[in-house]
Amino acid sequence: MRSARRTGSLRAAVIVGVALLMGCGGSSTTPSNSTGTLFQLVVHSSGTGTVTSNPAGINCGSVCSGSFASGSKVTLSASPAANSYFSGWGGACSGRTECTITLNANSTVTVNFTSNPGLTVQLAGTGSGSVTSNPNGVNCGSTCSAVFAAGTIIVLTPTASQNSTFSGWSGACSGTGPCQVTLQNSAEVTATFLLAPTLSVTVSGSGSITSKPAGINCGATCTSAFAAGTQVTLTALPGTSSFFTGWNTAGCEGVGTCTFTIRANTSVSATFSSTPTLTITDNGNSSGTVTSNPPGIACGQICSQSFPYGTQITLTAIPDPGVTFGGWNGKCSGVGPCVLTLDGSTQVTASFSKIPINHIIFLAQENRSLDHYLGALRQYWANNGYPDQAFDGLPQFNPTGNASSPTNPGCNPADPFQPPGPGSSFQDCVFDTSMPVTSFHLKTMCVENPSPSWNESHVAWNYNDPTGLLPAVLNGFVFNAGHDSRDEYYYGNILQDDVNGQRAMGYYDGNDLNYYYFMASNFATSDRWFNPVMSRTNPNREYLIGATSWGYAYPNGTNANDMAQIPTPVIFQEMQAAGITWKVYVYPNPQAAQYGTLFCAANDTRPECLYRLTYLQNFAYGQTIVNQYPENIVPISQFYTDAQNGTLPQVAQIEPASAIGLDEHAADYDTSPACCSVQAGAAYVEGLIGAVMGTPSAPSPSWKDSVFILTYDEFGGFYDHVSPQLAALPGDFAKPVDLFQGPPQIGPDICVSQTGPTCSFDYTGYRVPLIVISPFTKKNFVSHTVADTTAILKLIETRFGLPALSGRDAAEMDMTEFFDFSNPPWMTPPAPPAQNTGGACYLNQLP
């Protein structure tokens, strides 16, 4: 029999082998196709359990085999015995599921049964990585199966290889976190690793790119893999003297961070440059020019220019005639020059706006300070439901604090005034800080006139230092008023009653001047609006129309040094040359008057007579107006006609009605106190404004494109708690040319024997009221920009494209901050209350 097995056919050898195996406890089934090729499948078993096959042929324990036709698909199943565990296949099979083999050759399979359950890890996917276990046992790649005591809690941790990412578990675990298995039976887990998408960054210029999460740090590392679906944020960091100009990748633009979700291989380009570009745009509403220093920008609509990194550039906006510059947006703000350092490509917007105002009307009434007239404005707001805002009026009306009423030193009672008479001598007010006079409410609508003249204005600044070597303390108002009352009384010029000057501290409120308080609250006002000169009416009105007093601190003709007419232009001269229409409206003198050889009858409306009631006569050009353009000086009655017919000129000045006491000037004479009621003057102004404004149901034809500017020529000697301000540009004279040097006047004037900063025309005067009334005026607006009344000239010059008259008006704001030209708030005018006129009017007592 042995010889036969050695020399027999292959088929016989297979049959013999199976028979021998069967003799070791296995079984054999003869294939049905006895003529086909048979292959042997051998199973080696460890531990206790059974292996069966489908198709039948194997059903064994430790070692068995079966023969199957070539190409047979055989499935082996493992069944552990009691207290045994199937831990996996080996040889021609692996894993823990059924073993299926297609037999094309003799094959061997190992089956493992253990007394403890086994854990098998399989690696899958296009990427690579490893899995380790805790407790130790699995370290796959190298060891992918391990046996653990039943009930062991096993934690599997995946680690992706470079440029791969772990995408998740399957089998006994799921998700992407650590896999935790409590091993009660043998288990199988599959860990899938995928090739991770890569992010590549290309950098041009001097700079680096970093990523979050970490991975990119380019220069050093410009490629990194990230798990698919990761949100990546790239940040550009310019190098020295460099700036980032932008990204070049889908989904990212500009110069900020670049954030995207990576799902596939991605490339990003980042560019740095050392020559940033400055781009200027305008708001497209109108025209103007923007220029740069250093040169390069010179544009209207859009203009770009590259400059070396770190260049400091100053941009200047120049609006066209009839256009105002509204300010910068972007890297600059405000309306002044834009100064920036170019540390990257930058865009700046210059906003220009057309000025739709076609009629500018202005009236300067007489001699009132801001605190004296509108100091109680915030109290009026609180009482009448207006929103509170910053307004620097009298401090006792500030609702956000507990400020006390201001005071001024009074006159020493040990030095009372002595009326003139036999043996009496002039007894001046003696400055006494122990006798303060507190700000108080005036009940009389008429008060005696304090003085705002040169000396008094400087004493008001600081009684102990009127030339300005020391800061302003504003302590001389009461002294001035007391001194002037006693002086006038003693010399018999005027019968004064308030010989202690207390009236200087009086104020009016929203019940006294209800029309003004309403208009200032609904339209616009300012708490930093000053008269131009620290002196009286004449030089301030000369600044109002000519932007200079030519060095005069006194009215023309006061002394030998101010006899000449001022040779410089007035605003009307420039308008005449430019073809801008204008008129000066004058209230005729109700009294007959003789002016040299010119006789003017009562209420004479001839231009040459009206001219004598204006401050044009202080300028050389005034006579030219009378001779060549007499139609431009007209009676006030014409103003009402022009306003109501819509025929106002482009610029209109209204001279105050001083001849009939409606100019709001304080009383000069006790004999006619009714001349100077503030309520009567306000009611007169109400009529002028009403002619321009009309009513809500019937606006005047002039309303739609006009502005009425109400102000006051100077402060009149009444208290104000804000000091004069240094003008933006130096005055045109170092100091006045007509100060009195000594006798026969009382002199010398202040600034003759001693000089200081306030001795020139570099300082403004004191604050005066301002109300700006127009359909374009912002509602309830308060300007805090320091300006004086020559800003009215700047508005005229800006609107009509005229040159400045002097350095003073050239440096002023153009007043366009008071308006909203895009969304006019008051195309339908409000209905103001009628001005109260029933207030008491007396001069013989206070309050």
Image (tube, rainbow, N blue to C red):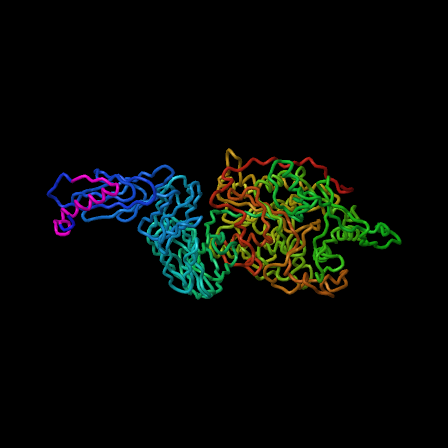
Q: Nearer the viewer, residue 374 or 61?
A: 61
Task: Kindly identify the residue that appears in the image at 32 percent across and 43 percent down.
Answer: 96
Task: Kindly identify the residue that appears in the image at 66 percent across and 64 percent down.
Answer: 735
Residue 107, magenta (yes or no) = no
The image quadrant that residue 100 belongs to is: top left
Q: Is residue 400 visible?
A: yes
Q: Quadrant of the C terminus?
A: top right
**Please, what is the dominant secondary structure of the magenta stretch?**
helix
Can you say whether 557 is above or below 406 in the image?
below
Farthest residue toward the left? Answer: 35
Q: Is residue 256 visible?
A: no
Residue 518 is situated, as x and y percent measured from the top left of the image, at 61, 39
Residue 805 is situated, as x and y percent measured from the top left of the image, at 54, 59
Start and end of the magenta stretch?
4-30
Q: Nearer the viewer, residue 372 or 667?
A: 372
Residue 24, magenta (yes or no) = yes
